Image (spheres, rainbow, N blue to C red):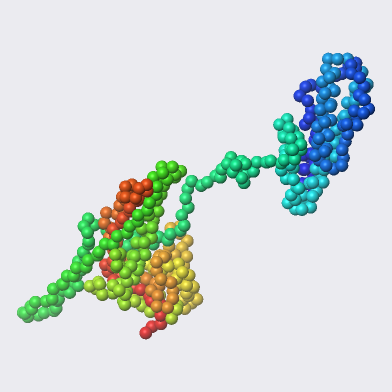
Amino acid sequence: MTALVAVANVFAHPIRALFAPAEPVLTLSAPVVPAMPRAMTGLIRADVTGDPKAMIAALQGAHNEFKATVEANVGKKADSAETQAKLDAINATMNTLEASLNDHALKLAGQQMAGGGKATPADPEYSGTFASFMRGGSRDDEQKLAAAQKAGVRAAMSEGVPADGGLLTPNEWDRTITGRLKQISPMRAESTVISISKAAFTKLFTDRNVGSGWVGETASRPATATPQFTALGFGLGQLYANAAASQDLLDDAEIDLENWLTDEIETEFSRQEGIAFAAGDGVNKPNGFLNYAAGGGAADRHPWGAIEVLSSGGATSIATDKVIDAVYKLPAIYTPNAKFFMNRSSLGSIRKLKDGQGNYIWQPTFVAGQPSTLIGYPVVDLPDMQNVAADALALAFGDMRETYLVIDRIGVRILRDPYTNKPYVCFYVTKRVGGGVKNPDSMKIIKIGAAA
């Protein structure tokens, strides 16, 4: 009902006001024009056949005759009775036409309401022009409507067609760019990081094998064992990207495309090195700490041996007791900074574990910026760890800062090359980075599988 009243209100204002002349209302005196022949009164009639085109045409004709009658008597004496009778006849015709048009508008509104507001006029372009005119159109609107009625052509501008006006309605667009998520490993933040100024890095290790013994006061003192030294080299791998963009695009883009592109490359480098720090095979890249686990490709690389691997206690799961075993297998000197490392999928399995009293061994944090804990130790989400599955290295526990060494050489270098591939500008970006385990004793790894 509300929609019907709204439509009725739009069309119910006196249509005569739309055609009212701009001149002030005249007060007519004695008649100076002859009485209108009865034959003329038949030309302006109220066509109530229901055709809005015919009603508009009749209304325009009545308006024109009303205006002509008024203008013909300006400044002249006229028979007020006869002139007034003529004007009354025209007014009556216009009133009848107004009522017919209002009825037509109400019927159209009723049809739209019955159809859920989705009814489509038979001639939408003409209906749009008609609606615009009825809401207070100007003389130009009136002429456009008359021309459309005469020619039978309903030309209209459309946003969907560029040539018909769509070019005047450009789309607003976002001048920021939202990138798809790249999971960046926190390995660099958790490890020891050093920068070097040479092409490689070598670290010295000692077995601390100093001989000693108890002797009597006068007993001989034979020579004892002395420590041995071992050198372990940490090679560097190289990351590179060679993205290109045309010079015109760099000049005309609404965003700083050059800085955006280099930032994206650096983000990709962070993702790639995180993968290598966790599980790299050492081929043109660092050896990941999982590769140093017993049975891994770098298990024999370190002079102190491989990282100890513990069983999870189940073929495809982890038992609570095995998580506790990992904590107490780690030497006490490393426990103050020790953390659990796993990916989010594995954490979903671990957090369901309970102790013998039915308490969950995983506890959420209630302090902003602090990690959740597993049997009292922080948990780090390391996306490049393996999922809980048969034979997977899914969980690690230890002091990563003591365990893993990240080596940077210079950092990220960017070479802007506008010459090699004209008209494109190439952004050749490189980064030399190495890594490896420096202390296998400070980490324990749980492998999914039953105890042998």
Q: Quadrant of the C terminus?
A: bottom left
Task: Give me the residue at 19% from left, 66% from top.
Answer: 204
- Say above or below: 355 vs 29: below
- Say above or below: 171 vs 384: above
Query: Residue 161: percent from the left, percent from the top?
Result: 61, 45
- Say above or below: 337 vs 449: above
Query: Residue 403: percent from the left, percent from the top?
Result: 30, 67
Task: Give me the residue at 93% from left, 25% from top.
Answer: 37
Q: Nearer the viewer, residue 58 or 83?
A: 58
Q: Does residue 353 appear to the left or right of 417 in the view shown? A: right
Q: Does residue 235 appear to the left or right of 31 in the view shown? A: left
Residue 347 appearing in the image:
yes
Residue 259 appearing in the image:
no
Query: Residue 401: percent from the left, percent from the top?
Result: 31, 64
Q: Nearer the viewer, residue 365 or 163?
A: 163
Q: How many marks?
A: 0
Query: Residue 288: percent from the left, percent from the top?
Result: 32, 68
Q: Nearer the viewer, residue 413 or 184?
A: 413
Q: Nearer the viewer, residue 245 or 42?
A: 42
- Say above or below: 145 vs 33: below
Classify residue 48 by image quadrant: top right
Residue ranking furthest to the bottom: 452
Task: Give me the residue at 73% from left, 30% from top.
Answer: 139
Residue ranking furthest to the front: 151
Q: Does residue 417 appear to the left or right of 226 in the view shown? A: right
Q: Does residue 223 appear to the left or right of 250 in the view shown? A: left
Classify residue 13 by image quadrant: top right
Task: Give me the residue at 88% from left, 34% from top.
Answer: 45
